[in-house]
């Protein structure tokens, strides 16, 4: 029986975590005995995984606490489950997977990098994580990155040797995220936005997403609506900023939503204002839904958005450029936007469909197992 354990720092409503869950379920459907292990107690996605018969195990660790008991629990799990492959995702899980190998033999260990800076906003923190990756690099058989931008940054900073680095992108379920005129009409009617140009932004309300710049840019778009789907530590401050800018009646904070495919269909344009990214899942989901995007040039954004063809890419933290690109997209003739939407969908299906991506993971797993 083919057996793989996916080790993740957390299970929450985030791009990296949702990618872990999607891959786990797809591997299970392809005949792999699959388990997901989270360092932290799951905050989301456990139900979806259980519905696909993918067990979820928590190591019971707490954010910000280095607890060696978590490593002991991981060793106990591995000795029972006996995976042929331990595939880790995000910084803390990547370190745990490498360190546990010193005490518990695992045939293959793969580490996946999900961001150009898997750290807080502190530069020192990024340097320390690069050093930790460099120190433990010999304990991983392969390191993968979700985008060329992520790979380039870690390689250039010595966090990983080029010989063991490979790019395997995030994947999107293009059957779930797809254009649906009936869903669009229903969602816009329920939201009361039938006749207005609607922007959608989705993701946790964190500093990395730079929603503050987005709100300032949106304040220059007086006749449009902005839907913000997600919650996070900056939520209260951003709601206050919307009030101060006088856009609180048009910038709608929707909180955490389970109906993102419907919201994608409701939107006329997607907007991403991040300063740090890997390969943004929300841009892949927007593209698959046939929604052109305006996005800042962070991480692998240019690998998602073909500037001028499926949307527009602008510099980070530049409100003027972001507002101008939003104006440009909203002012395009409907036929031109429709062509961009069609191109975005075709790009998502060709390059990022989840079945294609998981097929690449399977080939990688087999390749590494043949070396053992």
Image (cartoon, grey):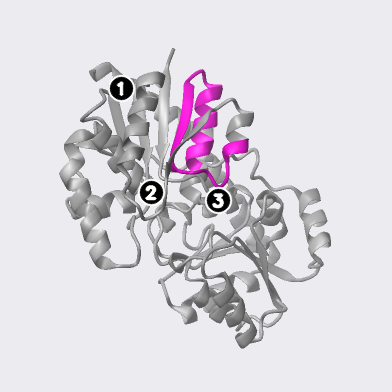
Q: How many marks?
A: 3
Quadrant in which the C terminus is drawn: top left
Disc 1: which residue:
367
Residue 273 appears in the picture as rendered: yes
Q: Nearer the viewer, mark 2 or mark 3?
A: 3
Pointer 2 local density, CA inside 10 Å: few below 14, some 14–19, many at least 20: many
Pointer 1 local density, CA inside 10 Å: few below 14, some 14–19, many at least 20: few
Q: Residue at x 43, y 57 (%)?
A: 301
Disc 2: which residue:
114
Where does residue 92 sit, x and y in percent of width and height?
A: 33, 46
Where does residue 292 sit, x and y in percent of width and height?
A: 59, 59
User: What whole-number distance in Å separates the C-alpha atoms at marks 2 and 3?
Assistant: 15 Å
Disc 3: which residue:
13
Whether tag 2 and tag 3 are in contact, CB under 8 A, the answer is: no
**What stretch of residues is rendered in magenta?**
19-47
Residue 109 vs residue 92, the one in the foreground: 92
Q: Is 194 covered by the magenta stretch?
A: no
Helix, strand or loop under label 1 = helix
Q: Is 26 covered by the magenta stretch?
A: yes
Circle nearer the N terminus (2, 3): 3
Residue found at the far top of this picture: 1
Helix, strand or loop under label 3 = loop
Where does residue 311 sit, x and y in percent of width and height?
A: 53, 62
């Amino acid at each position: 029986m083919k057996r793989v354990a996916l080790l993740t720092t957390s299970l929450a409503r985030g791009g990296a975590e949702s990618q872990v869950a999607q891959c786990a379920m797809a591997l299970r459907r392809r005949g792999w005995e699959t388990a997901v292990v989270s360092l932290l107690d799951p905050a989301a996605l456990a139900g979806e995984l259980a519905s696909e018969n993918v067990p979820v195990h928590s190591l019971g660790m707490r954010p910000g606490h280095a607890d060696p008991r978590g490593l002991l629990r991981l060793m106990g799990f591995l000795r029972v489950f006996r995976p042929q492959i331990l595939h880790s995702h995000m910084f803390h899980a990547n370190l745990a997977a490498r360190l546990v190998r010193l005490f518990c033999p695992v045939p293959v260990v793969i580490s996946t990098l999900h961001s150009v800076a898997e750290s807080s906003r502190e530069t020192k923190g990024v340097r320390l994580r690069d050093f930790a990756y460099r120190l433990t690099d010999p304990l991983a058989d392969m390191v993968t990155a979700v985008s060329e931008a992520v790979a380039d940054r870690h390689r250039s900073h010595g966090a990983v040797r080029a010989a063991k680095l490979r790019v395997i992108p995030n994947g999107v379920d293009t059957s779930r995220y797809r254009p649906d005129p009936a869903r669009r009409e229903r969602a816009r009617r329920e939201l009361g936005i039938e006749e207005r140009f609607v922007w959608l932004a989705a993701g946790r309300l964190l500093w990395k997403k730079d929603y503050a710049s987005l709100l300032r840019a949106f304040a220059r778009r007086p006749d449009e609506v902005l839907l913000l789907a997600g919650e996070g530590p900056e939520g209260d401050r951003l709601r206050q900023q919307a009030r101060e800018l006088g856009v609180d009646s048009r910038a709608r904070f929707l909180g955490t939503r389970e109906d993102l495919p419907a919201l994608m269909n409701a939107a006329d344009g997607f907007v991403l204002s991040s300063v740090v990214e890997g390969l943004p899942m929300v841009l892949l989901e927007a593209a698959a839904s046939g929604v052109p995007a305006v996005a800042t040039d962070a991480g692998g954004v240019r690998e998602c958005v073909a500037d001028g063809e499926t949307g527009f890419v602008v510099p980070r933290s530049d409100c003027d450029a972001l507002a101008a690109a939003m104006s440009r997209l909203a002012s395009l003739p409907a036929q031109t936007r429709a062509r961009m939407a069609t191109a975005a969908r075709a790009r998502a299906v060709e390059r990022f469909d989840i079945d294609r991506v998981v097929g690449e993971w399977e080939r990688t797993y087999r390749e590494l197992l043949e070396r053992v």
